Image (tube, grey):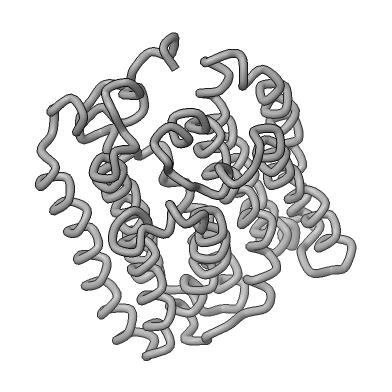
Amino acid sequence: MASVKPVKAGWYNVFRPWTLHGAVVPVLIGGAVALHDGKFDVPIFILILIGGILLQSAANILNTYGDFKKGTDTVENETRSPELVTGKLRPKSVLMTGLACLGISCLLGLIFIWHSGWNVLVYGLLGVIGAGTYTLGISYKYLGMGQISVFFLMGILMPLGTYCVLTGELFSMETFLLSLPNAFMITAVLSGNEMRDYEEDRKAGAMTLSQHMAYENGMRLYLAENAVAFPILLALILLGCAPLCCALAFLTLYDLYRLIENSRLARGDPHAGFMLVPMAFRLNWHFGVLLVAGYLIQYYALPLVM
């Protein structure tokens, strides 16, 4: 990664606000279905969005702390997380900030329980445990469980949890099905992260899921997770499980094309390797927003003109 310009060390990089689509898109999906079902409360929805962002931020911050403590982040690879290895920030400050984000999200959880009942507790506990133990405690990232947890916790449970808070219902099949394409794409972001850091993680003994594969197979997984959302969405539309206007998300096929082209250069080109993550971010953000926009257009805009 020597030819990649290091990021500016500081709190902005620790919080990684450019990753927050990972919380925003699932909340939008759950909120859109709840709105269609006639059970939508704007103040509560805003609090859910804040809670999701806090959980994502906690995971980002505690990951920085955990990777430093595990020795995964070093001065040799400071292009990704230079804050602690360079001494810019104190480890205790980073740890306490991450725990504070978790604590505030728990307080919001009490509001959600008051509003919707105890069903919400299932999603809240899983979210807090998932964000808090990614690189701390059981450190499931290093057990090869990171991608699996992101798929279920962020991709599936966060939309369902949003729906549950807004409606009081524990499960929604429509929310579950609509969340599946995004679940694979948000997982692909973490896959890109693992592939970007493939050599550094191998040297540090950080056994992510990608580390259990040859580089070529890890890259195939990254591409498959990004691409499979499109046939899943097509199937949902053809089967009547998603409205036709959700096909707006297919406009992001160009983003997928650029991502595939970049992946072909990733192993030999440090810049292309670095871009594995931003390109997956972009695809996931564009796809998710257009999916939700199409859903809302189908039920709220089209009836006005037809």
Is 121 situated left or right of 290 in this image?
left
290 vs 132, nearest the viewer? 132
> Where's residue 163, x and y in %?
51, 74
Residue at horizontal 29 percent and vertical 75 percent from the top: 109
Q: Is residue 240 visible?
A: yes
Q: Quadrant of the N terminus?
A: top left
Q: Which percent across, then down, holds residue 266?
A: 62, 21
As drawn, 266 above or below 60: above
Above or below residue 11? Residue 111 is below
| Relative side of 222 to 2, left or right | right
Q: Percent position (x, y) of residue 4?
A: 43, 14
Compared to 142, does 239 lie above or below? below
Q: Disc count in the image? A: 0
Apparent side of residue 229 relative to residue 148 in the rendered image (left or right): right
Relative vertical location of residue 183 with respect to residue 285 in this rendering, above or below: below
Front residue of 259/240: it is 259
Front one among 176 and 150: 150
Image-based side of 85 in relation to 138, left or right: left
State the residue at coordinates (37%, 90%): 118
| Residue at the farthest right position | 238
